[in-house]
Amino acid sequence: MEFIEADIAIVGGGGAGLRAAIAIAEADPGLSVALVSKVYPMRSHTVAAEGGAAGVVLDEDSLEAHFHDTVAGGDWLCDQDAVDYFVSQCTREMVQLEHWGCPWSRRPDGRPNVRAFGGMAMERTWFAADLTGFHMLHTLFQRSMKHPSIRRFDEHFVCDLLVDQGRAAGIVAVEIATGEFRAIQAGAVIIATGGAGRVFRQNTNGGIVTGDGMALAYRHGVPLRDMEFMQYHPTCMPGTGLLFTEACRGEGGLMLNKDGYRYLQDYGLGPPDPWPRKKAMELGPRDRLSQAFWHEERKGRTVTTPQGEAVHLDLRHLGRAKLQERLPQICELARDFLGIDPAEAPIPVRPAVHYTMGGIPTDVHAATSMDGLYAAGECASSGIHGANRLGSNSLAELLVFGRAAGEHAARYVREAAPAGGAALRWQAQDAQARARKVLAQAAGGERLAVLRDEMAQSMEHGCGIYRLEPEMQDTCRKLAQLKDRLAQVSLADKAAAWNTEWLGALELGFQLEVAEAMAHSALARRESRGAHQRLDSGITQRDDASFLKHSYAYRTHKGAPRIGWGDVVITRSQPGLRVYGGAAAPEAAHA
Amino acid sequence: MPDTRTIVLEVMRYDGAHDAEPRFQSYEIPFTDDMSVLQGLQHVKDHVDGTLTYRWSCRMAICGSCGMMLDGEPKLACRSFLRDFAPGPLRIEPLEHFPIERDLVVDIGDFVEKLARVKPWIEPRVARALEDGPYIQAPAELDRFESFSHCINCLLCYAACPQYGHDPGFLGPAATAMLQRYNLDSRDGAAKERMEVAHSEEGVWSCTAVGYCSEVCPKAVDPANAVNRTKTESAVDWFTRFLRRGD
Amino acid sequence: MAARRPYVRPMQPGWWRRNPYFVRYMAREATAPFVALYALILLAGLVCLAEGPEAWRAYIEALQSRGWLALHVLLVGIFTYHTFSWFAIMPKTLPPVIVDGRRLEAGAITGAGLAAATLCMWILWIVAGGAA
């Protein structure tokens, strides 16, 4: 097996991974960076993000307001020191990206424009039409090409970490084109592998969003934090789950039930102003809007489509010109997949899983509990999202914590003793053997897709928008069973080169671990907070006395994860009521 | 319960370990009106033949992974619908003009190298510190390059270009679109450097304005426009070089 | 284990026949030699003109033979397609044309070119008719 040395290995070439790589290259060009991604970086799922990235710019706005919106949006489960750091860095990162060429949409005076977004009291979402993630990713990827110290390992699938006496020391990856394994020995490792939304049936995520990095860390004893909090995005295409950006609502889109009624006013989000009032109605936070849909469906007030129940996202009143300028991709999606012209007809939408709030716990330096291991982006639990993420905080997070991870990893490798040793070679061989064992499993067993679909159905049922104890328990049992069945699955594809069925089996292994952490954490949190809502009697409300805590899922050698609890960092914002609707923002919206 | 219709997919297969050359394999699958070709392929891989190999991810025509030839035309599988090809047979082949790695997966390394060659990053015309805030860029200035920035690197344009097919040394449509994207960005000052990549047959001069690249582009980038404008600039550069002695 | 064995598909002769877009392109390219040919015919006429009225008269008479007339009819057809395809590709060679603060559509540029060409033909027809 080829053994390569690099100062820092980065797993994942999306927004966070690329930002980290560039940060290292700029801070310390003498350090070699190995950027390892299972897809070419421009295919990373950052590309699909649409609406925007937050950064305070307006005179009427303030870091304090961004802080408060984020903490309240997270239902007070946010680490407030992390939020403070985050909001203080957002604008700088947006400007940095602008200097690197990101084509932010502009106001007539040539300054970058900002728009309103869900749960935000003020316009602070920078945007590039409705292609913000796409433009950010391509800007970062192309910028990374400027730095010779960044060596890319495109289409290399990381199947394990190398750990030297409790310190991250590198990775083992399969070169997808050949099936050959390569080990990269590094002084520090940054995980930036994204979320795990594919463990659910209906989701906005691309096929690659399978929680790889979370599972890699988890298998080496790093706990996964707050995994019970999965964000449902309220406006997705029924069936495929494809995303219709929150910006549709930021620009003034309305959500109507089958009677043409703006139903959100029945769920504490009113009054139903004709203009978009911030933090009210359609600009409420995502968890509340998804929950409202669930109730409307129960009441039989949703629209029936061939792909299931939906409500209507009405953009007609925006007019064709504005739709073309601000929401061109949305128009394309509606036209190509649904045959609908948003200027003429409303779009059927429903909630689908979109974002993983939980992940590998990190501090403000993006450092994890393992020496030499950093994490940034959706795979991390940086503490800023708490129980529910506000839209446009995630794209900003990629940059803020991507940079933090890069700079701190760079400092770490300069100061720490070199990792390494013969033990790493043995570990790498063992990782190779374990991965190849999956390929060699006997014929006659089940097909991979059967297990994957059962996992996704079970997660949707047991860990949906509203959760019930017996259903979560069913899901936990089902996941344990699926893990056993995975060990017996038969692969039709025995080739070494480009064997995506085999890689799919490795991914399913990752997904089942992550799903277990999610389901068991959900079962253990006996309260309702943010995106984790339970219908069990007695636990339908927030319980700060017992559960103003982060959950930590620890992998056990066999069987269910062990769930522990840890404090939330509360500095100056004491838990209060999350107030949306007219009471939250009495002033009128800006243009 | 609607009638289940079926469609025949004729997919090109190739496994370098066993095959001397590619062959076709047929699959007949059930489909519904809203199923994309990608979903059809997923059905085959999941339930019929796990060895079928292809790239995909976002399912919404933004990641650029799933480019392939559908009945001889370069298309994105996630945005092409089985209903438009039924009952088939729909011939599915890997993107033309690229070496086949396996089945529908091609080697796109050549493009990635060309992308790097055009220096696809801003070299500021005027230096500016972060503390000074963003550059001012009027909407009209953004408009000059914005459509070129929409390229998702799906490479349908390279599959469309017969000149690239004849000579893979040609810089090609998407890479030239990125060259123009940066040259036209009001913040950038490295146009001269980038043009050095353009002045040869390995640059833009293999192009004979076929224009099919712009026809197949799923994002209306109009790479033919990028290449042909670059040709004009390259020609002007050449003819006026005497005026710039000492440059 | 397995080394990479990528398969390179050679471009097939007759590649252009499979796609109507390419057929039209090849037709466009095929008209170019005929433009060169006609330039030679006109050059011959110029030479004859320089040689004097006799030579000129002989040239004109030769061109009125059935063979030459047939060739000219064919050339008119070819040049019409040449003109049309030339203006069809012209928008691709231009930076955006801004009129009244809005970008001109490709169709408008092509249309304008074709209109100008038609106008020129009309004028020439009338002038040639007047001269004859």
Image (tube, coloured by chain):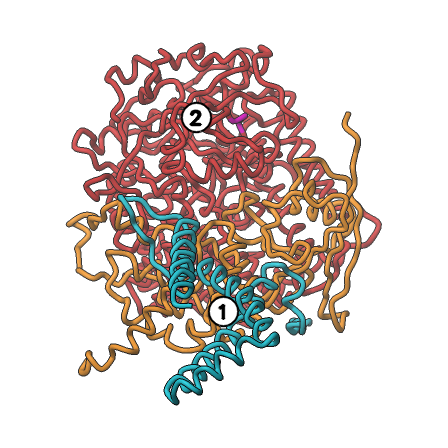
Q: Position of residue A127 (x, y in %)?
A: 33, 40
Q: Are marks 2 and 1 on the same chain?
A: yes
C81 relative position to C14: left or right = left
Label 2 or label 1, whichever lies nearer to me, is: 2
Q: Which residue is mark 1?
A: A421
Neighbor class of circle 2 (other Cα within 10 Å; few <14, some 14-19, many 20+) is many
B23 above or below B235? Answer: above
Residue drawn 29% across the image and 22% down it:
A574
Colour of chain B in the rendered structure image: orange
Q: Which residue is mark 2?
A: A315
Residue stretch rendered in magenta on the structure: A347-351
The single residue placed furthest to the right in the displayed view is A444
**How far apart are labels 2 and 1 at the CA level?**
61 Å
- The tag on residue B20 is none
Q: Earlier in the sequence, mark 2 or mark 1?
A: 2
Colour of chain A in the rendered structure image: red
Residue drawn 46% across the image and 65% down it:
A152
Neighbor class of circle 1 (other Cα within 10 Å; few <14, some 14-19, many 20+) is few
Residue A69 appears in the picture as rendered = yes
A179 relative position to B179: left or right = right
Chain that bears disc 1: A
Describe the element under mark 2 as helix, strand or loop: loop
Q: Position of residue B12 (x, y in %)?
A: 72, 60
Residue type indicated by callout 2:
Leu
B72 relative position to C41: left or right = right
A91 above or below B55? Answer: above
The answer to which quarter of the image holds residue B185 is bottom left
